[in-house]
Image (cartoon, rainbow, N blue to C red):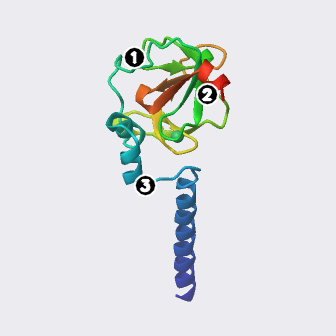
Amino acid sequence: MKIFKLLFLSLFFFSCSQAQEKKVEESKFEVVKTDKEWKQELDPESYKVLCGGETERAFTGKYLYNKAEGVYACAACKNQLFSSTTKFQSGSGWPSFFDQINDKAITEKVDNSYGMKRTEILCAKCGGHLGHIFEDGPAPTGLRYCVNSVSMTFLPKDSLQNK
Ligand SMILES: [Zn+2]
């Protein structure tokens, strides 16, 4: 009987420590703000997408046809995400890139919503929802980062050089 009790207790502790580890992982983002703070800082459309994981309507985004040279940053925390040199016309209705600006800009997460298995992309600095990544992009990566315009702020090349 004693052995069973011990076994039960160790199982209990094991699952507890696992839960704790998960909690640490969830708050790994450098920029952490409360939902209320984000709501105050962001415009309503950006808030719905970045914090609520929603998607802007296809072919409505302000950066869909933007061909200017520069950098796309996170609309919430200004973390630089994509260079205009990796932007391409995918025909999907959302701004598309074949690579992130560096390998630490974006975090990926499995998304099983709407009965589909997709990979969600998040800003690695604040955890804001950006869009999804697909494996049907052009060379050299074969990836398609499908991003909501409202999740990003475009920084024209000139404004970057003046800094
Ligand atoms: Zn961010």
Which residue was labeled with disc 2? 100
Q: Name the kind of residue labelled 2 in the image.
A: Gln
Query: Which residue is denoted by mark 1 in the rendering?
Result: 93
Between circles 1 and 3, the one closer to the viewer is: 3
In the rendered view, would you say 96 is above or below 119? above
Which numbered disc covers residue 18? none
Where, by quadrant of the figure, is residue 59 drawn? Answer: top left
**Residue drawn where x is 55% and y is 20% of the image:** 97
In the image, taking residue 119 as reference, residue 81 lies left or right, namely: right
**Residue lying at 43% horizontally and 11% vertically, measured from the top left:** 91
Q: Which of marks 2 and 3 is in front?
A: 3
Classify 10 Å Cα crowding around label 3: few (below 14), some (14-19), many (20 and above).
few
Q: How crowded is mark 2: few (under 14 residues within 10 Å), some or many (20 or more)?
A: some
Of callouts 2 and 3, the N-terminal one: 3
Q: Is residue 129 left or right of residue 139?
A: left
Secondary structure at numbered mark 2: loop
Whole-percent x and y of residue 45?
34, 34
Q: What element carries label 1?
A: loop
Query: Which residue does the image show at 55% across and 74% down from the upper left?
Result: 13
Tell me which amino acid carries mark 1. Answer: Gly
Q: Determine the CA span between mark 1 and mark 2.
A: 19 Å
| Residue type (three-letter) at the residue carrying disc 3 | Thr
Q: Residue at x 45, y 32 (%)?
A: 151
Q: Name which of mark 1 and mark 3 comes first in the sequence.
A: 3
Which secondary structure lies at badge 3? Answer: loop
Pick whichever of labels 1 and 2 is earlier in the sequence.
1
- CB of residue at label 2: within 8 Å of ligand 1? no
Q: Where is residue 145 in the image (x, y as percent from the top left)?
A: 53, 25
Residue 142 seen in render:
no
Q: In whole angstroms, how far apart are the C-alphas of marks 2 and 3?
A: 27 Å
Residue topped by disc 3: 34
